[in-house]
Amino acid sequence: MTIRRMKTYTGGEGYVYQYYFVGRRPALQGTSEEAATEFVFDVTSDRKTTFAVSVFLPDRAVQEWAMDHGRALTEAEQYGAVKMRLFQAFDEIEDLRSHGRRLFVDAALLEKVLATLGVV
């Protein structure tokens, strides 16, 4: 049995979200415009209804970052970038359940969030 650690984040829209990381997998064909890794989180803002949020990290963005920085991203760094995208959604999307269940990290956002995390 897997015990998941529920975490809490207070979003900019005033909602207090609870979430946990479910896992990662290659994005299924048709779920992303290009080859990507899908990171899945279970999220609740009311402690009653839990819904899945998928954050897609395109392979191309990861490869571009590696070429620009001369090294590959670790799995932990990829997870950190994806988690920052999730937090951005918590801060900016008022109704995450209806309008934020599929999030994407493009090359520019990847560069920005990794710089914020001190990853160079």
Image (cartoon, grey):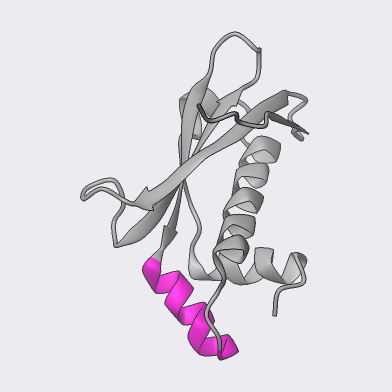
Measured from the top left, where is residue 58 in percent x and y? 40, 63
Number of marks in picture:
0
Name the residue rendered at 50%, 35% in the picture: 100
Q: Is residue 87 left or right of residue 96?
A: right
Q: Position of residue 84 (x, y in %)?
A: 66, 52
Q: Is residue 43 above or below residue 70?
A: above
Q: Which residues are magenta?
A: 59-70
Q: Residue 87's x, y, as percent? A: 67, 43
Q: For the C terminus, which image quadrant?
A: bottom right
The residue lying toward the viewer, choosing from 92 and 8, is 8
Q: Residue furthest top?
A: 48
Q: Nearer the viewer, residue 115 or 20?
A: 20
Where 22 falls versus 103 (above or below)? above
Residue 95 relative to residue 87: left or right = left
- Asked whether residue 87 is drawn in magenta, I would say no
The residue furthest front is 1
